[in-house]
Amino acid sequence: MINFSKKQQDYIDSSLEKNIYLRACPGAGKTEVIAAKVSHEMTKWTRFPAGLAVLSFSRSATAELSDRITKVRRGNSNIFPHFVGTVDSFILKHIVTPLAHVVTGYAGRDGDYTLRVIGPEALNFHRARYPISHQTISANRYDWDAAAGQYLFWHPSDALRRKLNSAVLEGWQIRDLESAKQRFNAAGFATYKDVERLAIAILTEPKFAARIALLVERFPSIIVDECQDLSAEQITIFAHLADLGVRFHLVGDLDQAIYGFRNCFPETVKDFIARIGCDAMPLAENYRSGQSIVDLHGKLINADKAEGRLDCAPITCYLVEYANCPSEVLGQFNALAAGHDDAVIVARGHSTLARLRAPDPEPGPVQLIAAAIVAFNSSAPGALYSALSLFARYLTANCIDCDTLGEDFFFRPAEIESAETWHRFLADCLSELSKHGLDDQEISWKLWCKKLKDALPRLAAVVCNEAAFQPILDTMQTKRHPAPANQGQEKVGDVAQQRNQAKEGLRLATIHEVKGETHDLTMLVSSIKQGEASHWKEWIADPQSEAARFAYVASSRPRHILIWAVKAVSAPDREKLFALGFQSYTG
């Protein structure tokens, strides 16, 4: 049995008849508190068939909540009439699906009128009739943005995405896009933004008032975990429900709002909290991290003083510096991580993490292929990502004569729409090469390159279901692949292993991926240059910025040790970092 603090227990005992904002600092134990609250309400619930809705933003978070609730209820997993799920699933299932056929004209499939939600990378043949900026636009690659007052487009190429979103559309083009959306929805498809748009239309349409009144009776109270991740559209939906009498308990920390690209802004959530008159109930005690870590990440966003754990070492925040590439600090990371089972390296973007996986900025063609095959046959976390990235880098530099979409898209040729098809092609090539002995890293480079020459014709076995694939394979077979200079007699593994720095058990992740997690040790890696909120100077420049919140989220993950890895700094800049609470680590 958990011994809750007075403030935690006060929330567990709070009334569902009031709107409440439970501000939970990092490590406040909010998941356990929510589980105890929900279990407490289920035990005394008398409003059947009405129920309580408990919502979060990801399937993993929902699964964890469900597990915790079941545990508190001593194995009882029957939650009816209550609902535990994602915000998206609640809106789709309980607001949109019952009326989807009316608002979209969807005829359904075998009596099922549920819209199928698809992402922008899916192949979809419901498209606008007329190109925009020479691009034919699929209906799942654009959505209406009410805040911007325009359609916003998605494209895997950043340059083309910017071009599309800067285009000034004529009235006939807007009508064409609207028509494509209508056909798309009428066929039973939707984007997540479409679902939210349809929900708002349903909630504001007088003829659906009786149906929405039933929904309010069905779910008179809603608990939203990680409420700082609510988008403007989701807040509009919940504001309508609040106006009709639904009570909300909003749980989260506005300083952990890091989804600006999804129209999730702390100011908007703060306005919603004020609009529905929430009582504030703060949880300011951090049961995860030592006091030095709590003090440091609090300074990033000018947070009020919070209490941390008292059973941690007094020095737990370290600054490490690299001269040219982040991979230079892996040795220091390993030294500090010794004895800790859960040590994670975190960065703002995949490009910085890629420098840790493949630190040599100029590997030769055969080194790239060899390193890719090493990673492809490894079971280490992140190895498959590394394998596909390395092989795609080789193809881009040596075999592809067209525009590619960059590192985050595995250098996919722009004309290949399906990411899955490209990934499968890369994996099939590596699988075929591995079959012919190129996974043997104990032979010399000279012998390995001979095996590569013999194996290349066998790539004819790779299925080429895109016209762009065959020229890539043909070009690869025309290339000479000599052994690295002065290394012909050295073992392939001795060199290729340097390209695959991710050791067994080492996890590399983005800040978004670790949000909500707890680690023993976290190393946050700053990019080499400023841009996209990935550099330490951006993290400390403005406590109100999203960049500061990125650093706050990442720096509040560890229990015992926090490391910032930065490109070598000047003495004055080093003092700024020391003022936050860091100490240099040179071991």
Image: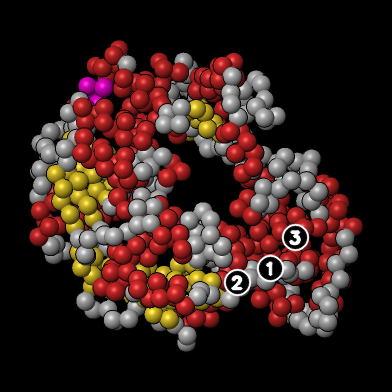
Left or right placement of residue 481 versus residue 159 in this view = right
Can you tell which of label 3 and label 2 is closer to the viewer? 2
- Asked if the residue at tag 2 contacts the one at tag 1, i.e. Cβ–Cβ closer than 8 Å, the answer is yes
Is 585 rendered above or below residue 425?
below
**Residue ID for mark 2:** 325
Instruction: Indicate left or right for 31 with 346 as reference.
Output: left
Quickly name the residue at label 1.
361
Residue annotated with mark 3: 394
N-terminal label among 1 and 2: 2
Q: At numbered mark 2, what does the secondary structure look like: helix, strand or loop? A: loop
Quarter of the image for residue 67 reads: bottom left
Asked whether 377 or 408 is in front, the reply is 408
Q: Considering depth in this image, is 568 or 507 the residue closer to the camera?
A: 568
- Specify the amino acid type for callout 3: Tyr
Report the magenta residues as a range. 212-216
Tell me if I can see residue 379 in this picture: no
Closer to the eye: label 3 or 1: 1
Q: Residue furthest bottom?
A: 587
